[in-house]
Image (cartoon, rainbow, N blue to C red):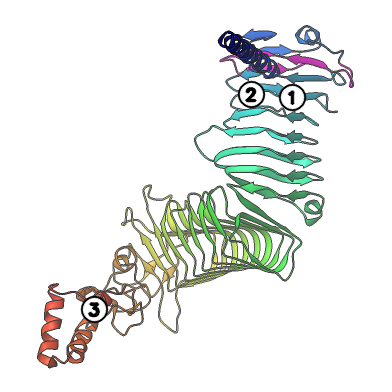
């Protein structure tokens, strides 16, 4: 009896467990269905099409599942699945002003536009919980006061949004090959909050915005690009708590007399500020490292930037960039409408434009090195009162006549000497070209020193192509160390201006011949010999033994790690 009771109890427990499992499974399944029904990818769709559709006054009610088009009862157009090679997925074209509608829970693919919204002026259109894939996602020149929420957008170039955009809780993917925009906002009353943007050296552009909020956004492999016409415009905006690749976006407005340690910022934008130092900025693989707009007396020191552009400076005065390292694809340093700029001891590599200057008055370039520049090393348009000394600029000329280490147009009052201009591509071509300029001095009369030009034949003067001005004192091997400028710069990276680059009392040529490092003051000819003899004496072995130790160390038979300092 006891066994039967136990058996019955066991069966009851087992059946109960099976019922619980079955119920749980059914509940989970129903829950899954409920979640799935809320998702735009649900197979329960109202319309499927391989062609784009146009929605206007005559058919909007047909495409709607509910609503009357009133502001408090908009037409609901939902569960569309359109995958078309047509240029447009859904084209709202011909819906009258004052008719409100909401596109939601849909998946739309078009070759040019996933959705195109025409001529809304009072917030008639809302897009919610959609996936939209197209070359351009959502927009229209007159798409004002548009609301986009909880969407996934994929495109090769973001549209321009103007006036009253509300853009919240979206995931945006830039799917182009290189450096396109993930968001473009302009003008007044835009709200862009709590979004994720995924790019490829891409940018979030905010141009001349007012009364706008850009907050709580995360950018990945994308950064911000701001342009503002006035401090009054900038003061009306709220820009805060944005992150780029997990690091903060450093937005600084109206800051004065500060030292900003920027090493924990992915990017820095400073506007309407004075007498401020930005130190140790670190920016990697982004569209831009630092922007300085509408500022006075700003110093950038020790920046390390890699990416598309390095440092952008506009409508500012009294700017110093020093001891910074920029490895970029487009512009290293860009100056536009700037006064009193000093660029000192900076290193720029690989940029198309090393230092790009337009409308600059009072430009000083000292001791900068620009290597492997693609198109223009120093590019000067409408620049005045320019001074260039001790700069090294190399240009890789592939298209003669269109690429120069230095190019200038309409430049006035310039002193340019003690510079090295190297063409490392087609080296028979001139590395310098300029036209329309006045009062340019290419040499120092007292010192009888001009510049080095890689295409100079080594005798006589040098004629600058374009304006045909004359450098009376071009030179080769100005420091007299028996090394050509090309070898100094491109092979040994030693200074063409210093006979002894590391200051250890041995000239560069001697160090190279002896196999020591001309850039390391601790490594110099004879150092190992002296130390080996001293060691021999210290070990009590006498001078002959010391000399023997030296000989064996030179042959590599015995080694002293402390003699190999680098």
* Residue at numbered disc 2: 132
Q: Is residue 83 magenta?
A: yes
Residue 274 is situated, as x and y percent measured from the top left of the image, at 72, 67
* Residue closest to the eye, 35 or 515: 35
Asked if residue 305 is positioned above or below residue 510 in the image, the reply reads above
Residue under the point 58% across and 47% down: 245
* Residue closest to the eye, 394 or 96: 96
* Disc number lying in front (3 or 2): 2
- Label 1 and label 2: CA atoms lie apart by 10 Å
* Residue closest to the eye, 138 or 46: 46
| Residue 203 appears in view | no
Residue under the point 76% across and 61% down: 254
| Residue 566 appears in view | yes
Q: Secondary structure at mark 3?
A: helix
* Residue at numbered disc 3: 510
Q: Look at the image and give the residue range highlighted in magenta.
A: 69-95
Asked if residue 17 is positioned above or below residue 356 in the image, the reply reads above
Q: On the picture, is 421 further left or further right than 9? A: left
Residue 496 is situated, as x and y percent measured from the top left of the image, at 35, 73
Residue under the point 47% across and 61% down: 467
Q: On the picture, is 477 further left or further right than 244? A: left
Residue 461 is situated, as x and y percent measured from the top left of the image, at 36, 71
Q: Are marks 1 and 2 in contact (CB under 8 Å)?
A: yes
Residue 541 is situated, as x and y percent measured from the top left of the image, at 13, 90
- Label 3 and label 1: CA atoms lie apart by 72 Å
* Residue at numbered disc 1: 127
**Marks 1 and 2, the one that precedes in the sequence:** 1
Q: Secondary structure at mark 1?
A: strand
- Label 3 and label 2: CA atoms lie apart by 67 Å
């Amino acid at each position: 009896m006891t066994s039967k009771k136990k058996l019955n109890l066991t069966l009851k427990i087992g059946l109960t467990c099976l019922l619980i499992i079955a119920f749980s499974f059914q509940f989970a399944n129903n829950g899954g269905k409920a979640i799935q029904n809320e998702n735009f990818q649900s197979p329960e769709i109202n319309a499927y099409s391989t062609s784009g559709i146009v929605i206007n006054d005559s058919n909007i009610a047909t495409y709607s599942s509910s609503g009357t088009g009133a502001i408090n009862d908009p037409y609901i157009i939902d569960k569309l699945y359109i995958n078309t090679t047509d240029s447009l997925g859904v084209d709202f074209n011909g819906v009258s002003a004052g008719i409100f509608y909401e596109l939601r829970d849909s998946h739309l693919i078009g070759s040019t536009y996933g959705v195109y919204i025409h001529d809304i002026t009072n917030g008639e259109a809302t897009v919610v919980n959609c996936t939209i894939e197209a070359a351009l996602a959502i927009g229209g020149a007159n798409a004002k006061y548009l609301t986009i929420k909880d969407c996934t957008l994929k495109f090769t170039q973001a549209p321009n949004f103007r006036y009253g955009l509300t853009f919240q809780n979206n995931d945006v993917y830039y799917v182009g090959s290189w450096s396109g925009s993930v968001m473009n906002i302009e003008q007044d009353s835009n709200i862009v909050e709590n979004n994720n943007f995924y790019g490829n050296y891409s940018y979030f552009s905010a141009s001349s915005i007012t009364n706008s909020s850009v907050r709580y956004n995360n950018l990945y492999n994308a950064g911000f690009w701001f342009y503002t016409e006035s401090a009054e415009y900038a003061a009306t905006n709220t820009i805060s708590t944005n992150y780029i690749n997990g690091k903060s976006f450093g937005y600084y407005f109206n800051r004065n007399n500060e030292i900003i340690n920027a090493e924990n910022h992915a990017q820095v934008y400073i506007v309407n500020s004075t007498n401020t130092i930005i130190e140790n900025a670190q920016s990697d693989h982004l569209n831009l490292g630092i922007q300085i707009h509408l500022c006075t007396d700003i110093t950038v020191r020790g920046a390390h930037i890699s990416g598309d552009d390095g440092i952008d400076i506009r409508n500012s005065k009294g700017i110093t960039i020093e001891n910074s390292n920029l490895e970029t694809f487009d512009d290293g340093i860009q100056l536009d409408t700037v006064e009193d700029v000093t660029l000192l001891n900076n290193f720029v590599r690989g940029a198309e434009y090393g230092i790009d200057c337009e409308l600059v008055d009072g430009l000083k370039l000292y001791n900068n090195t620009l290597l492997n520049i693609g198109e223009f090393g120093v590019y000067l348009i409408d620049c005045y009162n320019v001074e260039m000394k001790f700069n090294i600029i190399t240009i890789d000329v592939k298209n003669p006549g269109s690429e120069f280490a230095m190019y200038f147009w309409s430049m006035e009052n310039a002193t340019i000497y003690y510079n090295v201009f190297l063409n490392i591509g087609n080296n028979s071509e001139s590395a310098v070209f300029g036209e329309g300029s006045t009062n340019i001095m290419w040499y120092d009369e007292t010192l009888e020193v001009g510049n080095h030009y890689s295409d100079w034949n080594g005798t006589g003067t040098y004629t600058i192509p374009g304006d045909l001005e004359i450098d009376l004192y071009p030179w080769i091997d100005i420091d007299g160390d028996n090394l050509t400028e090309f070898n100094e710069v491109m092979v040994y990276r030693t200074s063409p201006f210093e006979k002894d680059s590391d200051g250890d009392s041995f000239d560069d040529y001697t160090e190279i011949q002896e196999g020591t490092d001309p850039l390391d003051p601790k490594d110099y000819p004879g150092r190992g010999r002296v130390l080996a003899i001293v060691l021999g004496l210290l070990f009590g072995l006498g001078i002959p033994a010391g000399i023997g130790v030296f000989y064996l160390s030179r042959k590599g038979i015995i080694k002293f790690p402390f003699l190999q300092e680098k």
